Image (cartoon, grey):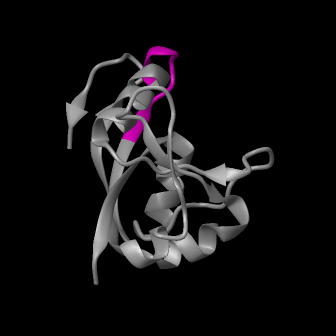
């Protein structure tokens, strides 16, 4: 099966939910969050996590593989710079997205609220 590596910056609550799922599923979107937004580059995910950390929240960057056959039904959106490529998965399709994850979700960077970076 062909896969694509994706990344997602997450906060402490979402990280806890990932742990509770045994690193296999992202939690449902909250009210007011119409999309689940994974990104295509680690650099983009880390930029978002750094910004969250600078504003006082701990942030983490996750990496995971998703079936390319599943992703092919969604457009890639570029937000600003070329490296800012993301998918917008409708919240009601998150369960199907989770089913398309191949392997485990892993934390690859940790941004404590103080703004310091630790590589996992």
The vertical placement of 40 against 18, above or below, is above
Residue 120 relative to residue 50: left or right: left
Is 54 part of what is drawn in magenta?
yes
Residue 110 relative to residue 87: left or right: left
Residue 54, image x and y in percent? 44, 15
Residue 7 relative to residue 29: left or right: left
Residue 9, image x and y in percent? 44, 41
Instruction: Give the image quarter of residue 3.
Output: bottom left
* Residue extending furthest toward the bottom: 1
* Residue extending furthest toward the right: 31
Q: Residue at x 41, y 27 (%)?
A: 81
Q: Nearer the viewer, residue 47 or 60?
A: 47
Q: Nearer the viewer, residue 54 or 89?
A: 89
Q: Residue at x 55, y 49 (%)?
A: 37
The vertical placement of 19 against 21, above or below, is above
The vertical placement of 8 against 22, above or below, is above
Q: Nearer the viewer, residue 119 or 90?
A: 90
Image quadrant occupied by the C terminus = top left
Q: How many marks?
A: 0
Q: Residue at x 29, y 34 (%)?
A: 43
Q: Residue at x 38, y 37 (%)?
A: 45
Residue 95, image x and y in percent? 61, 73
The vertical placement of 54 against 70, above or below, is above
Instruction: Give the image quarter of residue 93.
Output: bottom right
Image quadrant occupied by the N terminus = bottom left
Residue 105, image x and y in percent? 35, 62
Is 3 part of what is drawn in magenta?
no
Region in magenta: 53-60
């Amino acid at each position: 099966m062909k896969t694509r590596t994706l990344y997602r910056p997450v906060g402490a609550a979402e990280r806890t939910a990932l742990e509770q799922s045994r690193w296999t599923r992202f939690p449902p979107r909250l009210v007011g969050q119409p999309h689940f937004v994974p990104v295509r580059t680690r650099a983009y995910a880390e930029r978002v996590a750094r910004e969250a950390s600078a504003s006082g929240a701990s942030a983490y960057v996750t990496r995971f593989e998703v079936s390319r056959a599943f992703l092919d039904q969604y457009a890639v959106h570029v937000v600003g710079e070329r490296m800012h490529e993301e998918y917008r998965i409708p919240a009601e399709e998150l369960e199907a997205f989770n089913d398309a994850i191949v392997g485990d979700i892993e934390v690859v960077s940790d941004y404590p609220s103080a703004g310091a970076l630790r590589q996992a």
